[in-house]
Image (cartoon, helix red, strand yellow):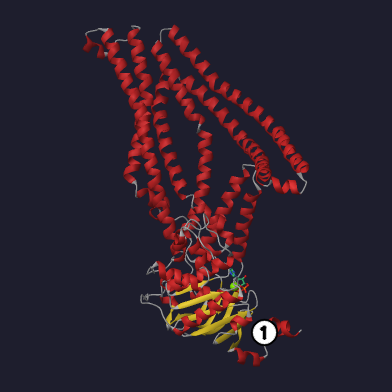
Amino acid sequence: MFSSVKENFIYKILLQHKRKIVFLLCGSSIVAFFNVLYPYLLKILIDTLSGEERPMILNYFQDNTFLFLIFFVFLIAFVDILDQIAPTLLNLIRYKFDFSIAGTSETLLFDKLKKLDTGFLENPKNQNLIRSFFNLPQLINDVLGFATGNLQKIITLGMLFPIIAFLDIRIILILLLFVFIQTILLFYRIPIANKNRTQTEYIQTKISSIRWALFGRFDQILALNGTSKFLKKYYDLREKLFRTSYPIEKQTERWRLSDWLLDTIPAWFTMTFIGFKILQGDLTIGDFTLILAYTRQIQNIFSTVPSTLNLWSQFFLDYTRINFFFHLKPKYRMIEPIYRGALKGDVSFHQVSFAYPIFDETEAYMLKEVITQNKKQLAKKERWKYEDDEIKEWEEIFSTNQKKPRLVLKNINMVWKSGEITALVGRNGAGKTTTTKLSLKNYTPTKGEVSVGNINLDYVDPSDVRNAVSIVTQDPIFFDSLTLEENLLLGVDKKPNTSTIMKTLKRLGVGELVAKHHKGLDVIVGEDFRCSAGQTQLFTIARVLFQDRPIIIFDEGTNQLDPEHEATVMDILQEQKKKGKVVFIISHKITTAAKADHIYVMDNCKILEEGNHQELLAKKGLYKKFWHLQVEKNIFE
Ligand SMILES: Nc1ncnc2c1ncn2[C@@H]1O[C@H](COP(=O)(O)OP(=O)(O)OP(=O)(O)O)[C@@H](O)[C@H]1O
Ligand SMILES: [Mg+2]
């Protein structure tokens, strides 16, 4: 299931930063070396000054201990300074590194997203999964922090262990015993701590939302004469918070004391052992300080073992999710030789059948792995409801995937002619929007072919297909944080000048709105500019005109508009068709569809009827029924 190392996304990212990584690892080793060196220098100094030892270096000072002391203090100060500077440098490098890692990871993510078909992205159930992929930069940074931190620990241990074991093996045994006890305790405490944390967080979020209502909407509460009830709720929650959090606080303090004891008892033992040895003349005072410093370091390292293990399982979870993402394959078909020319002309569906694609075997396996890892991680803690819901959603996605896909289009034959307006009507869920997705090559047909100007879309890159199609949907989106102009010109190759933009906006009836604003087209959407749903739709229609692509699709693209604006838009579409473009509209408003040159009626995945308005009325089928319900019935009954 797992790909070779070279294919692995973590490897790919790290490889791009190998020099920085080597630097970081060397830096960590140097820091580890300083950690060991410092107490050792101190020991030499103490032993020399107390006359216990006579190091060789004393020869250079002609046995002048005063000069030796000055030199040694300088040496220790030097190591001290390096010991401080090295981590500072490392931190700065880490900071830069974090930024470039994030850059590389995001590029990799977006490249993958661009290649992926929209099928996976459009499913709202996948939103949480997609969001989790953006943990990638964090994952890489964590992995690196983990590697450098642990390397430092391993090197330190590798140097300290033999030294201490050589002096007195019992110290190591006692240390190990206490570390073992601490680890067991920690594993026992993690779920309790998680549960406590979640409990208080629950109450705190409730309190803050009530507080928000109190501060922000006190006028409404007063108007309802609801102050006493509201405040009672607030005080009750505060009381509950105290009742929940105080015992937790007491427990935390108890844990702190017991941790301190477990930390200190080995130090007492060590002091006793070493003290005896000093009395017997086996060890020196310098050894005493050395061992105390070293045992403290070993203890510090060991105390991080449980959190390291915990971190590891978190990594693994993130890794599984992101690995799943990198294994997703686009579901559209690409057949060589790829057609690179511009697309233009009639859009035709020939014997098209289609089922929404499901995950292939590897993808399904990986999704299962994501679910398993998530469950494992959640089992360790009290969880928020949404965390359970998230897993349920993924399980649902997984189980849907196990079923045989259902055809949503069956043997569709349809032509959207250039220079004509083609309409598609039909009941909800009939498959209308799905046809637009096929024309955009968001998906490829399960059977049959969709072509533009006789070029089968199987031979065209999706981005080239999208370059030929403009679309307005029933719930148009304008992106916050972009300016109005940036929003209007998304996907526009040739930037029109401001007066052209304003002229189009005026014609669509939204020019005033923009002209009135002191920032004009430079207003930032969502910040200092908000518009109604209908106005947003008019702006997206303007965008279609700026994109000036040969195929225009309106999927309920006028449903937010008043009759006056709709008439203007229909006039504009008539002009577009006269320019030889393909205009395709899906509409539940039968009077809108009636204006088309050719109308298709779809039901239950199939095309039922086709023709112009008069021909379809004469057929007395579903179209006639819709017409009767929407027009005749309203007028005559
Ligand atoms: N991404 C998807 N994955 C799986 N099934 C889908 C997806 N999108 C739509 N469907 C299913 O395909 C069928 C056709 O949906 P489609 O959106 O094409 O209908 P529609 O005719 O546009 O309906 P409406 O008039 O309500 O817009 C429906 O049964 C729908 O549940
Ligand atoms: Mg639809």
Q: Amino acid at mark 1?
A: Trp
Quadrant observed for ligand 1 in the rendered image: bottom right
Whether residue 359 is visible, yes or no, is no
State the image coordinates of residue 142 (x, y, percent, origin top left).
46, 42
Q: Is mark 1 within 8 Å of ligand 1?
A: no
Q: Residue at the spot x=40%, y=35% of the render?
A: 151
User: Relative to 452, does residue 15 appear above or below in the rendering?
Assistant: above
State the image coordinates of residue 141 (x, y, percent, origin top left).
43, 44
Q: Residue at the spot x=55%, y=69% of the render?
A: 537
User: Going by the image, does 389 lie left or right of 159?
Assistant: right
Check disc 1 and report its element: helix, strand or loop.
helix
State the image coordinates of residue 615 (x, y, percent, origin top left).
61, 92
Q: Nearer the viewer, residue 111 or 270?
A: 111
The total number of labels drawn is 1
**Residue receiving disc 1:** 627
User: Relative to 183, does residue 526 appear above or below in the rendering?
Assistant: below
State the image coordinates of residue 612 (x, y, percent, origin top left).
58, 89
